[in-house]
Each structure stands twice: as structure tokens, then as C-alpha cells.
Amino acid sequence: MTGFLRRLRGDRGAVSTQLVLVAPALMLIALLAVQFALAWHARHIAQYAAQRALAAARAEDGTAAAGRAQARRSLAALGSRALTSPSVTAERTTARTTVRVKGTVMRLLPIPGLVLQASGTASGPTERLTTPTGDQP
């Protein structure tokens, strides 16, 4: 019986020690999962803003400046907390229009070197009026 009691006394506090070691690791894993989910969300925000800007810039009477303005309006409407310091570039030629939205993902953890970027790109043909060619029925 005394050997049994000695074994019990030797394990005293083991659960507390394990909890102190495991709980922070589990919290870090959970926060990293939330950080990467936030990066995924910020990428969707950037893609949405790029698509809206493309629709404005590639229209027949649209301009690259109109596309950039539409992207900024879309980003403002969605909120700028997930995607911080966004930059918008729009290029419009007679054949093709391309819009890129890039930004930094909001940081939850102050881990050095963990700076996530999110970007979205939309590209499509520039709208223009054409006349039909060939024989008319």
C-alpha cells in the first residue's frame, strides 16, 4: 500500500504542468487557423474589388481611372480592416483591360516575418462597337 501512495505522490501536479505546456500551443494553432482564414477572406475581397473595377473600366465609355475609383469604392464598402493598405492598378488598351488589387492582410499574431499579402486580378476584353462585315442577308 505504501508503494501505491508513493506513486500517487510522484505524479502530483503533472496535469497542471501538461496544461501549462499544451494550452498555449493549442491557442497558437487556433489563432494561426484564424489568421489564414482571414487571409483567405482578404483575397476574396481583393478579387471582388478587381471584378467590379474591371466592369467599370472595360465599358465602352469607361477609363482606367473609373476602374480604380470603382475598386476604391468597393473596398470602402466592404470595410478596410481585413485588407489593409490596398493598392489598385488598372490598365486599359483598345483590346484588353486588366485590374489588379493588392494589399496586406490584417495581423492577429505579432509573429516576426508573418506578413501575408492578398491580391486579386481581373482581366477581360475592352468593349467596343463594331460593324458587321460580310454579306447581309
Image (cartoon, helix red, strand yellow):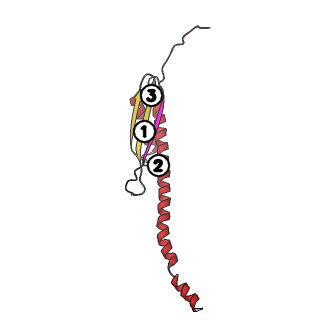
Q: Secondary structure at mark 2?
A: helix
The correct choice, above or below, for 127 with respect to 42 in the image is above
* Residue 15 position within the rendered picture, expressed as x and y whole percent measured from the top left: 52, 76
Q: Which residue is mark 1?
A: 101
Q: Which residue is mark 3?
A: 97
Residue drawn 39% across and 34% down?
A: 89
Chief SS of the magenta region: loop
The one nearer the camera, 116 or 4, is 4
Residue drawn 48% across and 75% down?
A: 17
Q: Which residue is mark 2?
A: 39
* Residue 25 position within the rendered picture, expressed as x and y whole percent measured from the top left: 48, 65
The one nearer the camera, 4 or 89, is 4
Question: What's the amino acid at mark 1?
Answer: Val
- Between the residue at mark 2 and the residue at mark 1, the CA separation in whole angstroms equals 14 Å
- Residue 57 is tagged as none
The one nearer the camera, 125 or 5, is 5
Q: Within the magenta stretch, is there residue 111?
A: no
Question: What's the amino acid at mark 3?
Answer: Thr
Give the tally of numbered discs.
3
